[in-house]
Amino acid sequence: MKRCALLVLACSTVVVFAADLPDSGLPPVWQSWRYWRALGVPATDAPRPALSGAAGLVKATLPIEVYARAQSELGDVRLIDDTGSEVPYVLEARQGARTLMWRTTSVVDLGDIPGEGTHVVAEIPVDVERHNSLRINTDEPDFVAFVEVAASAILPPPEKEESAWRIIRDGAHIFRLRKDGLEGVQTVSYPVSTARFLRLRIRRQEGKGLKLVGIWVAYEEVEVPELTALPVDKVTQPAGAKGQSLWQVDLGTGQVPVSQVRFVVATPEFHRGVEALTSEDGKQWTQAGGGTLHRVSAPRGAGMPAKPGAEPADVAQLSSGGVAGLVVEFAEHRGRYWRVEVTDRNDAPLAGVHIELWGTPRHVIFRWEPRRSYRLLYGNERAPAPQYELARLLGREDREQAVAVAVSAEEVNAAWVDPRPWSERHPVVLWIALGIVVAALALLALRALRQA
């Protein structure tokens, strides 16, 4: 009797313990997906207040580890609920956009002021309703200058000139150093304006004027991309050629999209060329982007007053032609290894350099239903990319209202079945069989020759 009681107690303990263990297997229909992660959505009838809006839309940000396990374009990512049913989703990546079209202005006044530089007044074309960017066209191969931009609705008479012009940008840095291989920056951005006239005061460091070919203006619309710093465990500094500084990064996987390299530099002033390259093996390198890093301090003097407490202008020439912080940006590239090359020429290497790789994260957006739990699946190299109509049904405002939910740690599908054909899963057996066939054919041919 005691033995029976102990057996029943042991069995019940095992049953209770087994019930507490998480089920690491996926339903049979999903047996070809090797990995999964649970999503932190409520599984009760009472929705969270934050999830009650936007038609119950939630979003889960894919961890960087998913890129290493999934297909390169994430075509094998699937979402299922606790019944094993496939849940439609939208894979969103806010990569941003920049649009502008340059228009030529009419120069109505141009001259050099001794000791101050070039003074130019440009009239905006009538059909340009608003503008926020200008480009200074010059044939001079080497120059460093600073620009003050003022705006006016009318062309004021000389006696009212100072009171009519409103300064909208001061101390903008432009340069070109072709002798050092740097094309530099010739664009200046400023707040959106509807003024019909712009006045530019261009002061070079040596105080002389700048030979102008023309002034272009444009209205630039910028959709700011969503970017996040990528975790980098190891940054090395291999020896480079003379006059060059190198940094090399290993991301651990070649599937993570990268679109920016950001710099932190302690050197107060500099102009340096920079290139970003990527590689799968750390040996063969492909250029991803490049441009010019620089930091300068606006001068204090006549015609270019510095604002109180003004800091040095941290700007970088991008391969796309725009201006930003100490950043080199480019179209998305993938590669396990990244190398950043800074051209020092005969100057001392930049001090206190720290580099970061940045990229646009991917979000899975879907409609959450009460009393349902969800799992994110990936790791099936044979799965075709899904096609859902949800992408056409959700507007941008809907997606922006989606509430972020947590993504749990990775689990391995205990019931995983390799989706590859038998021949691909056992190539050794195939080669052995082929060798046997070849040997048999050779033996038959040898017998036929002897009989002949």
Image (cartoon, rainbow, N blue to C red):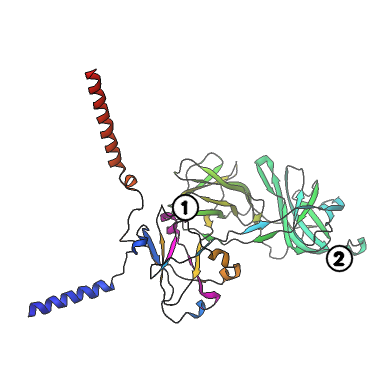
Is 241 included in the stretch rendered in magenta? no
Q: Residue furthest top?
A: 452
* Residue at the extreme front of the image, as rendered: 452
Q: Quadrant of the N terminus?
A: bottom left
Residue topped by disc 1: 72
Q: Is residue 8 above or below residue 317?
A: below
User: How dense is the environment of label 2, judged by Cα within 10 Å: few (below 14), some, or many (20 and up)?
Assistant: some
Question: Can you identify the residue that label 2 sits on?
Answer: 164
Measuring 57% from the left and 50% from the top, which residue is drawn there? 350
413 left or right of 86 in image = left
Q: Residue 215 at what x, y percent from top left?
A: 79, 51
Nearer-the-camera pick, 73 or 243: 73
Q: Is residue 71 magenta?
A: yes
Residue that appears at 51% across and 78% down: 50
> Which badge, 2 or 1, is on the more N-terminal residue?
1
Residue type indicated by callout 1: Ser
Q: Position of residue 405 (x, y in %)?
A: 47, 71
Q: Identify the magenta region.
A: 52-79
| 190 sits left or right of 38 in the view | right
Left or right, 446 with reference to 33: left
